[in-house]
Image: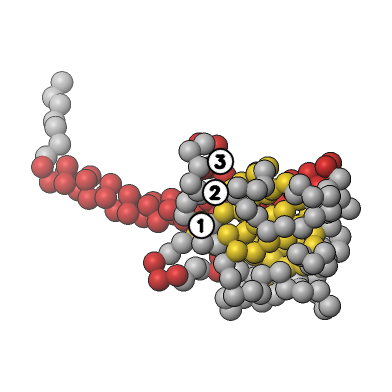
Amino acid sequence: VLRRGMTLGEMMTVVALMGVMGSLAVPGFLESRKRSAVNSAARQAMLTLRYARSEAVRRRNNVGISFNRIYNTITVYAIGTPNGREYFRITRHEILKELTTETRRREAAKEWPKGVKIMESEVAGRLPNLPEPYAELDGLPCTFCSSGRIETIFATPRGLFVDINGIPVTGAFSVVPTYPGGEEPSQYNRAIAFNGLTGSTRAYGFNGGMWK
């Protein structure tokens, strides 16, 4: 039986085809990774708000939630004073839960990927408002309208969300993958919204020209 090996030309053709197939597959793989990372971050951010709410109810005391957009962290911390509302100080408060990329715990690193960042209350530039009841409601202050980079809200024993003055707040923030130049395609935006009047939270994705 005669067995003929591949010629050099045939081998080059196979290699070229493999290269083309690989170049077509890589973008899809990278997009899948971006979507997976931002979906995971949005879910963990929403669950962190719910955790803070349940802890406040269980402890029968306010629990703080600090959003730090400089270090890209969300910190849930205990308040020592009954019904107190205090800005987070690492030397003063007990951390109950923290989402951060700086942790060495492998599980937490998966929950809050390094390629995802917290954005401000506009949720995402040039995109429409969230649907009610999670859009900013008349008469309630905007939670993330300050010019600073650290914002704080509080979960109460009644299961609501309030500001430093104890006033119910409603608002949203977004998590997006980082890109050179700071432009984030809208399909990767995920919004985490909360309604201080009801204590409800929800994660949204932008698809088909609307939040869903």
What secondary structure is found at the residue carrying circle 1?
A: loop
Left or right: 106 in relation to 89: left
Q: Give the vertical position of 103 relative to 207 (above or below).
A: above
Q: Say which amino acid is labelled 1.
A: Tyr
Residue at the (17%, 42%) spot, across then down? 11
Instruction: Measure the alpha-carbon separation of dots 2 and 1.
Output: 8 Å
* Residue named by callout 3: 108
Q: Say which amino acid is labelled 3.
A: Ala
Q: Are marks 2 and 1 in contact (CB under 8 Å)?
A: yes
Q: What is the x, y in percent for residue 122?
A: 63, 73
Badge number at residue 100: 2
Q: What is the x, y in percent for residue 197?
A: 86, 64
Residue at the (10%, 42%) spot, across then down? 8
Q: Are marks 3 and 2 in contact (CB under 8 Å)?
A: yes
Q: Say which amino acid is labelled 2.
A: Thr
Towards the viewer: 177 or 7:
177
Residue at the (40%, 71%) spot, across then down? 181
